[in-house]
Amino acid sequence: MRAYDIIYKKRNGEKLTKKEINFMINGFVDGSIPDYQMSAFTMAVFFKGMDFEETVELTFAMVNSGEMYELNGLPYPSADKHSTGGVGDKISIPLVPIVTTYDIIVPMMSGRGLGHTGGTLDKLESIPGFQVNFEKDDFFKLLKENKTAMIGQSRDIAPADKKLYALRDVTATVDSMPLITASIMSKKIAEGAKNYIFDVKYGSGAFMKDRKSAEKLAEYLKKVAKIANRNGDYILSDMNTPLGNTIGNRLEIIESIEILKGNGPKDVKNLTERLAARMLVLAGIFSNDNDAINDIQKKYKTGVYIEQFRKIIEAQKGNSRVLDDYDIMPAAKKQFHYKANSSGKIIKEDALQFGLAALATGAGREKKEDDVDHSTGIELIRKEGERIEKNEDILIIHYNDENKLKNALTYLEKGLVIE
């Protein structure tokens, strides 16, 4: 069997066998299949697709490339959440402290920025000292102590996905339904949680551009979860415009902390509560979403969510002073105030263009080896649908490099429309 023949077969739109899919995944992990052949393979899948059976085989080939964790020995039920990626989507950061104040284990293995979308790990690393790289023993220690571990994939969890994730990011093969499904579910199945809620985005800033495609992906995720004997459910959410008021790592951490204090933008707060409620219902803590949301909302003023996040930060070697003093996170050296050139109504803040603008400031990666600038990003002063007067601030760009600012402005000019 040769990688060339399998690539050729998929390029021609033919269905692959379990054996062929396993050959590609195992060869990529052990190094016998190089990056350039796997890039060709993912591009063939991107254009020709995979049916559901192939997608399931790809998922389990990636699961079986590493170890599967068992959480049965822990004292509480387990649940996890996954977003398909968006612009300004920082939901995991406030959600985990909220959910784990209830008796639920949340093994939150997250990813880094992918294309124009931000990554939870990059955001968490804005907090000075915060560590996201832990192996199995420390992972279970964190779960026992804090009911969560907000970490990256350990070396033994779906190593095929970890390699493939980085490759897809820089080869324009991110938004492929089979590849997205296999990537998400291989990690989730291997990490051991029994209940999942999927936040499946649709719109210009999402990988699924329309609601119908998002629903199809959501159903794929739910079906694969069932095959793996897990409970799965989903929420479809709009990503035509950025979520919240910030895009960029440091800025999104600040917004997340404000949510835990009971403040922050309504759209972020509402989606966080909806997803948290669904996790609590799936895990058997509440019988319905409304009761769960009501209970969640009562606790903001008690400070219990902030204290839980403090424990998580300290357990992962971060500086918890960040909860009280945002200035301990290095800020960008410069700010550009983007002003309205006319009065009117903001009818468009395109999530894709705004995500690309944040990427241009250095907040994301264009190549897999790129470093992320945690200090840069975009702060939205006015949101889509609001009226604005001439010369008022629409947004503020936080930046360190003049050339990067120029690149960011070109994307913003495409993505912003005032009527």
Image (cartoon, grey):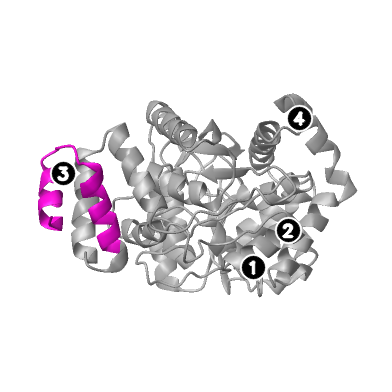
Q: In this view, does 30 lie to the left or right of 199?
A: left
Which dot, 3 or 2, sits closer to the camera? 2
Of residue 95 and residue 226, the one placed in the foreground of this image is 226
Q: What residue type is labelled 4?
A: Phe
**Residue 16, picture quadrant:** top left
Q: How far apart are marks 4 and 1 (CA)?
A: 30 Å
Q: Position of residue 207 (x, y in %)?
A: 39, 42
Q: Which type of secondary structure does the marked residue at label 4 adopt?
A: loop
Q: How crowded is mark 1: few (under 14 residues within 10 Å), some or many (20 or more)?
A: few
- Quadrant location of the N terminus in the rendered image: bottom left
- The outermost residue toward the front is 73
Would residue 249 be visible to someone looking at this image? yes
Residue tagged by mark 1? Answer: 138
Residue bounds of the magenta highlight: 1-28
Of pointers 3 and 2, the one earlier in the residue sequence: 3
Q: Name the residue under label 4.
A: 286
Q: Where is residue 307 in the image (x, y as percent from the top left)?
A: 82, 57
Q: Is residue 53 left or right of residue 228?
A: left
Residue at horizontal 39%, vertical 29%?
A: 216
7 falls in the magenta region: yes
Residue 317: x %, y % from top left: 70, 73
Q: Are marks 1 and 3 in contact (CB under 8 Å)?
A: no
User: What residue is shown with label 2?
Assistant: 144
Does 229 sit left or right of 181 as displayed?
Answer: right
Q: Considering only order in the chain, which callout, 1 or 4, is on the residue closer to the N terminus? A: 1
Residue under label 3:
10
Q: Looking at the image, do the residues carrying marks 3 and 4 touch, with CB atoms under 8 Å apart? A: no
Q: What residue type is labelled 1?
A: Asp
First of labels 2, 1 by sequence position: 1
